[in-house]
Image (cartoon, rainbow, N blue to C red):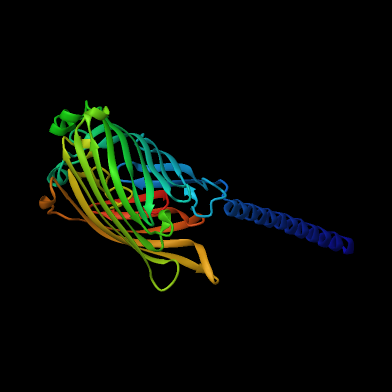
Amino acid sequence: MRYLKILSAFIIINISFTAFSQNTDTLSWIQRVKKNRAIKEKEGRLLLTPLVGPAYTPELQFTLAGGFMMSYKTNRFDSLIQRSSSPIMIGISSTGAFFVNSKLTSFWLQDKLRIYGDFVYKDMPDNYWGVGYDKALNTPKSDTTTAYRREWWQINPKFMWQFKKNNFLGLNVDLNYTHGTEACKGVSEDEYYKEFNNKPFNSGLGLVYQFDSRDIPVNAWSGWFAEINATIYNTKLSGDNDYMLLSLDYRGYWQIKREGSILALQVKARLTTGDVPYGEMSQLGTPFDLRGYTWGHYRHESMFFILPEYRYTFKKGKGLSKHGMVVWTGVGTLGEKVNEFKSWLPNAGIGYRYEVQPRMNVRFDIGIGKESVGFYFNFNEAF
C-alpha cells in the first residue's frame, strides 16, 4: 500500500509537470508570435490575419465568409506614411451565391499619393423590385414578381494627390457590369430591366476632391473627411450607357472623454442623371450605410442618408483592449431628384469589434431596417 501511494504521487507529479511544461511551451510560443508580429509591425513588413465567420443578410441569407486582413507599408523606410491595407473576403451563401471583394487603402511617396480601390464580384440569385420608393413598398417579393439571377462586378480605383496639407485632388476610374438572367415575369417586364439589361457594361472617368484630416482612415478617432466626386459614364469610354454621377460625402469623428470612445457621423448624397441603368441606381441598405435592409430593395436616381454611430473600445488596465462595441441609428431617403425626397427609411443597429491588427478591426453588426434584419461580418468600419 505504501508503494502504491508513492507510485500514485509520482504519476500525479509527472502529469502535473508535463502539463505545466506543455502550458509553458504554449505560452512561450504565443509570446514569440506576438514578439515577431510587433517587430514586423515596427519594420513596416507584411502582416496577414486569416478569418472565417458566418453572416446573415436579407439578400444573401445565411453566408459563410472567409478571408484575411493584409496590411503593409509601401515603403518600409518612409516614416511619413501609414500602413496600407487591403482586406479580402470570399463567401458562399445558402441561396447559391458566390462573392469576392476587396477594399484597398494605400499610401505612397511620403503620403503625397493615396490609392483607394473597391473590387467586387458577385454571382447570386437576387430580387429586383423596380425603381422608386413606391415600387419597393408595393411590389411583393416572390418567384413571379421579383426573382432573377444577377452577375455583378466592379473595378473602382481612385488616385489621389496631396497638393496641400489634408487636401487631395485626383482621378476616379469606375468599370462596372450588371447583367440579369433567369428573370421572372415581373422582372422581365420592368421598363428599366428591358432597356438596360442588354447594356450591362459601364465605363466612367471623373474628378475627385478630398479633404482628409483623419488620424487613421480605416478606423478614425479624430478629424474629418469630405469628398466631392463628379464622374461621367460614356459610350465614348467604351461603356454601354451615358449618364453622370455626383457624390457628396462628409464624415466626422470626435473623441468623447477618453481615447477609444468615439462619436462618428456620416452624411452622404449620391445623385445621378441621364440614362442610368438599373444596376447603377443609387441604393440604400448596403453593408456600408443603412445596415439591415435588403441591398437593392430601395433604389432610385438619387439618395441621401445621415448615419451617426457611437464606437466604444473597452479598457484593459491603463490601456485599451482589443474588444469594442458600436451602436448606430440613421435615416435615408431616395427619389428621382432631390426635391422629390419624401419618405424616410429608419435604421438602427449594434455591433461587436475585435482588433485583428493595430487599429484594424473585424466587425460583426446586427442591423434593423423597416421589416428586415441583417447580420454582417466584415473587415474595418462601415465608414
Left or right, 206 with reference to 157: left
Direction right: furthest residue: 3
Residue at (78% x, 60% y) in the render: 12
Q: Choose top left, top right, bottom left or bottom right for residue 369.
A: bottom left
Direction bottom: furthest residue: 257
Residue at (56% x, 48% y) in the render: 76
Q: Nearer the viewer, residue 311 or 27?
A: 311
Does 182 appear above or below 161? above
Residue 301's spot in the image, x, y percent? 17, 43
Residue at (22% x, 42% y) in the render: 245
Left or right, 104 with reference to 199: right
Residue 306's spot in the image, x, y percent? 25, 58
Residue 159's spot in the image, x, y percent? 37, 43
Left or right, 165 with reference to 187: right
Q: Nearer the viewer, residue 278 or 53?
A: 278
Residue 214's spot in the image, x, y percent? 39, 59
**Residue 108 in sight from this viewpoint:** yes
Q: Nearer the viewer, residue 162 or 372?
A: 162
**Residue 142 in sight from this viewpoint:** no
Direction left: furthest residue: 339
**Number of residue marks:** 0
Q: Nearer the viewer, residue 39 or 172?
A: 172
Left or right, 90 with reference to 128: right
Direction front: furthest residue: 163
Screen quadrant of the C terminus: bottom left
Screen quadrant of the N terminus: bottom right
